Amino acid sequence: MYFLVLFTLNDIKGLPREEWKNHTVREIMSPLSPDLVIGPGNSAFDAFLKINRGPTGRLLVMEEDKLVGIISKTDLIRFLQIKSMLTD
């Protein structure tokens, strides 16, 4: 059985580098919460709104209990820029 967690640079930002080897991922990770998850049927705009409210700059795309993707804030901004250029 797998447990999904999100581990980002923000999770270790406050920890001195020399302490990294003394900690496990479990101690540092962001617990999975509804704020970090979105479904594949949601719009890019919904994802953008949600990602801006969240603490990590990323969303896990979940379909039922399966991870089907990860979206970053940078990915969304780039997607919206490209879409805007193509629709002008």
Image (cartoon, rainbow, N blue to C red):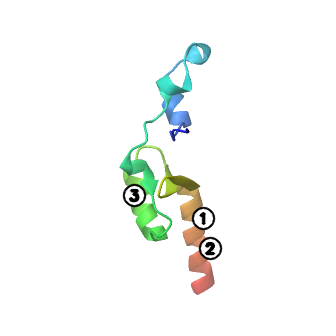
Mark 3 and mark 2 lie on one chain; the one further toward the N terminus is 3
User: Which marked residue is nearer to the observer: mark 1 or mark 3?
Assistant: 3
Task: Please tell me whether residue 18 is drawn above or below residue 66 in the rendered image.
Answer: above
Query: Disc 2 marks which residue?
Result: 82
Mark 1 residue element? helix
Q: Residue furthest bottom?
A: 88
Q: Can residue 70 be seen?
A: no
Q: Is residue 34 above or below residue 38?
A: above
Res 84 seen here: yes
Question: Measured from the top left, where is residue 67 in percent x and y?
Answer: 55, 53
- Residue at the disc numbered 1: 78
Query: How far separated are the C-alphas under marks 1 and 3?
Result: 16 Å
Q: Position of residue 27 (x, y in %)?
A: 48, 23
Circle 1: residue type? Arg
Q: Return the residue at label 3.
A: 50
Q: Quadrant of the N terminus?
A: top right
